[in-house]
């Protein structure tokens, strides 16, 4: 074994020893109802860099419109990762304190579109390594698979080869799929792959955690119809896969029975959705760290009204993509609702008395808004 390889493995071993100490804190049991902890969260990050040739030199798309759209995204990503996103990571790092159990990233860790599985895997390594070093150096870093994380030539295969092994090391348990669960004290975090949902796996994860105090569903995509540009792209919705309304209702019912809290990304919005129905209660918090425009570094509310749940834009295109009947089954149960295009970092606070999310728009030092989930 050459010296460089030995040093690399040695450094990994030292890091894992430190990580094991932290994992013992994550998985430790405390007196029921007495645990208090927090989690630092980043939404979609779409990690990329300039010039675009670093990760996209082999990207080819014969479809003229998607090729144009994706290349515009490369430019957007390179610009936001020049200064804004690095400063946001540093802000997120300052949210970590002695009660922080882990750092969570909500999927679309990377842009994807590499055109080559080896480059795709390098992009995953680079992005995960950056978030690990900048925000989660002494903590486990957990990510859920997003649509961009598996977008491109053999990208899904590359992600499945790389990420379960990394998640196994971070969580100190065997992770073999892109849907898995882990516990923090009495609470369970069920991480689900909304791109390729496996109902049997979801059922097993729910059954294994039936006695959890709080159930957190971690999904890149939302579990209710979205309000952005792709409203049908939700769990068991019909944007990329055939819609399955029966399966959607089944799992919403299971989540509602548990009074679950859904943590999501995907829409590039900061959205709070509190809903009662199917015999229970679901709170969905959608988080965004795509700081694509300078103005998204400020928390500006688009809607703060349960009756406004629906497409943000009233354009013909938006209404066609998300017609009123798409939202109608859920609208009566929405008790609290707000949405903003702001991007930033988040701190989920769990205590015996409440569950809140503090949102820090851009790199704000002060809390931009506090959401009360429970």
Image (cartoon, grey):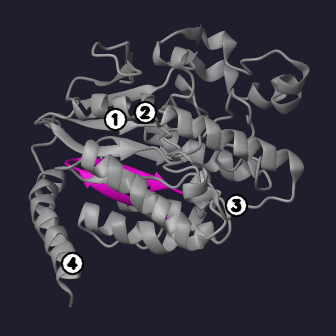
Which residue matches tag 3? 59
Disc 4 crowd, CA 10 A, few/some/many (<14, 14-19, 20+)? few
Badge 3 or badge 1: first in the primary sequence: 3
Q: In which quarter of the image is residue 169?
A: bottom left
Choose mark 4 or mark 1, whichever is in front.
4
User: Which mark sits nearer the N-terminus, 2 or 4?
Assistant: 4
**Mark 3 neighbour density, 10 Å: few (under 14) some (14–19) many (20 or more):** some
Q: Do the residues labelled 3 and 2 touch (CB within 8 Å)?
A: no
Instruction: Report which residue position mark 1 lands on.
Output: 89
C-alpha distance separating marks 3 and 2: 24 Å
Query: Which quadrant of the structure image shows residue 333?
Result: top right
Q: Residue 78 bears which disc, if any?
A: none
Distance from disc 3 to disc 1, alpha carbons, whole Å, reads: 28 Å
Q: Nearer the viewer, residue 83 or 229?
A: 83
What is the x, y in percent for residue 178? Answer: 49, 64
At 34% from the left edge and 35% from the top edge, which residue is drawn? Answer: 89
Q: Earlier in the sequence, mark 3 or mark 4?
A: 4
Residue at figure coordinates x 69%, y 34% from the top left: 225
Which quarter of the rendered picture does the C terminus lie within? top left
Q: Is mark 4 on a helix, strand or loop?
A: helix
Q: Do the residues labelled 1 and 2 touch (CB within 8 Å)?
A: yes
Give the residues drawn in magenta, as a range.
178-194
Residue 317 position, x and y percent, is 88, 26
Q: Distance between the residues labelled 4 and 1?
A: 29 Å
Q: Mark 4 points at which residue?
A: 4
- Magenta segment's dominant SS is strand
Residue hosting label 2: 85
- Residue 273 lies, in percent from the top left, at 54, 24
């Amino acid at each position: 074994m050459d010296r460089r390889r030995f040093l690399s493995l040695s450094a990994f071993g030292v890091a894992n020893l430190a990580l094991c100490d932290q994992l013992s804190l994550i998985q430790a049991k405390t007196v029921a109802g007495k645990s208090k902890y927090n989690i630092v969260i980043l939404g979609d990050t779409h990690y990329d860099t300039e010039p675009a040739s670093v990760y996209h030199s082999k990207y080819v798309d014969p479809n003229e419109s998607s090729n144009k759209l994706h290349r515009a995204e490369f430019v957007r990503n390179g610009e936001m990762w020049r200064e804004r996103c690095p400063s946001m990571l540093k802000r997120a790092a300052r949210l970590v304190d002695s009660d922080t159990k882990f750092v969570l990233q909500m999927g679309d860790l990377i842009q994807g579109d590499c055109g080559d599985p080896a480059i795709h895997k390098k992009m995953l390594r680079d992005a995960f390594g950056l978030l690990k070093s900048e925000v989660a150096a002494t903590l486990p870093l957990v990510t859920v698979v997003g649509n961009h994380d598996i977008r491109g030539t053999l990208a899904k295969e590359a992600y499945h080869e790389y990420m379960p092994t990394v998640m196994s090391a971070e969580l100190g348990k065997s992770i073999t799929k892109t849907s898995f669960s882990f516990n923090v004290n009495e609470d369970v975090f069920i991480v689900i792959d909304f791109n390729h949902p496996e109902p049997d796996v979801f059922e097993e994860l729910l059954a294994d955690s039936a006695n959890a105090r709080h159930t957190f569903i971690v999904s890149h995509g939302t579990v209710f119809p979205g309000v952005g540009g792709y409203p049908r792209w939700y769990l068991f919705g019909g944007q990329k896969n055939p819609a399955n309304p029966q399966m959607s209702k089944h799992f919403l019912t299971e989540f509602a029975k548990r009074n679950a809290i859904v943590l999501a990304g995907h829409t590039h919005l900061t959205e709070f959705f509190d809903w009662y129905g199917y015999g229970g209660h679901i709170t969905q918090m959608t988080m965004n760290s795509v700081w694509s425009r300078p103005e998204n570094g400020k928390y500006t509310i688009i809607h703060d009204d349960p009756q406004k749940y629906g497409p943000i834009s009233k354009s013909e295109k938006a209404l066609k993509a998300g017609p009123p009947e798409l939202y109608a089954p859920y609208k009566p149960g929405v008790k609290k609702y707000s949405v903003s295009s702001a991007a930033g970092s988040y701190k989920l606070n769990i205590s015996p008395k409440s569950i809140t999310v503090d949102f820090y728009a851009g790199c704000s030092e002060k809390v931009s808004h506090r959401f009360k989930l429970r």
